Image (cartoon, rainbow, N blue to C red):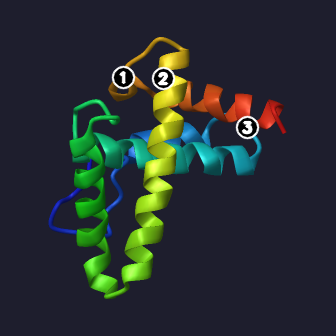
Amino acid sequence: MSNQSDPFSNPINIKNIQAIDCLDLPTMQKHHVRILAHCLQILKTITAENIYQSSFKNQLREWCENQSKQFDDKKFSELFYKQLESTANKLNTFSQKIGKNIQDLDIKDLVLLVEQDQESI
């Protein structure tokens, strides 16, 4: 899990990283799974509530602003927020499609999402 005192720490643990590395997927798809797993853990860290609640967007924006303070770059904060919000929407839509709560998604689910995305290209 994340280390709150180290803003550069990785929210996903080494076990998950190794599991992703062992997947029988092309390198780009593994990378996509890692990014989704990282974002999912960030979203879980921010809130356990439904991501469509109005308070979630405020929490997400505040979290992004806090993370970007070390860079003193407002543009970074806004871009980071937009990317995480987009990922949250994608993960929420996917979780509803497969009948799971977003909080219950796991690596296997993220692999399925990446494979479905690849098929739609």
Looking at marks 1 and 3 on the same chain, the residue that comes earlier in the sequence is marked by: 3
Specify the amino acid type for callout 3.
Answer: Leu
Specify the amino acid type for callout 1.
Answer: Asp
Q: Which residue is pictured at 78% across the width and 36% down the height?
A: 118
Q: Residues within 10 Å of mark 3 (few under 14, many from 20)?
A: some
Q: Is residue 106 left or right of residue 98?
A: left
Looking at marks 3 and 2 on the same chain, the residue that comes earlier in the sequence is marked by: 3
Q: Distance of mark 1 from mark 3, alpha carbons?
A: 22 Å
The residue nearer to you, when weighing 10 against 78, is 78
SS under mark 3:
loop
Q: Are marks 1 and 2 in contact (CB under 8 Å)?
A: yes
The label shown at residue 25 is: 3
| Foreground label between 1 and 2 | 2
Farthest front residue in view: 54
Q: Quadrant of residue 7?
A: bottom left
Residue underneath mark 2: 95
Instruction: Check the image and report above or below for 95 versus 41.
Output: above
Looking at marks 1 and 2 on the same chain, the residue that comes earlier in the sequence is marked by: 2
The residue nearer to you, when weighing 104 against 20, is 104
Q: Where is residue 86 drawn, in percent x and y? A: 51, 49
SS under mark 2:
helix
Specify the amino acid type for callout 2.
Answer: Ser
Q: Quadrant of the C terminus?
A: top right
The label shown at residue 57 is: none
Residue underneath mark 1: 104
The answer, for residue 17, to whether it is visible in the render is no
Farthest bottom residue in view: 72
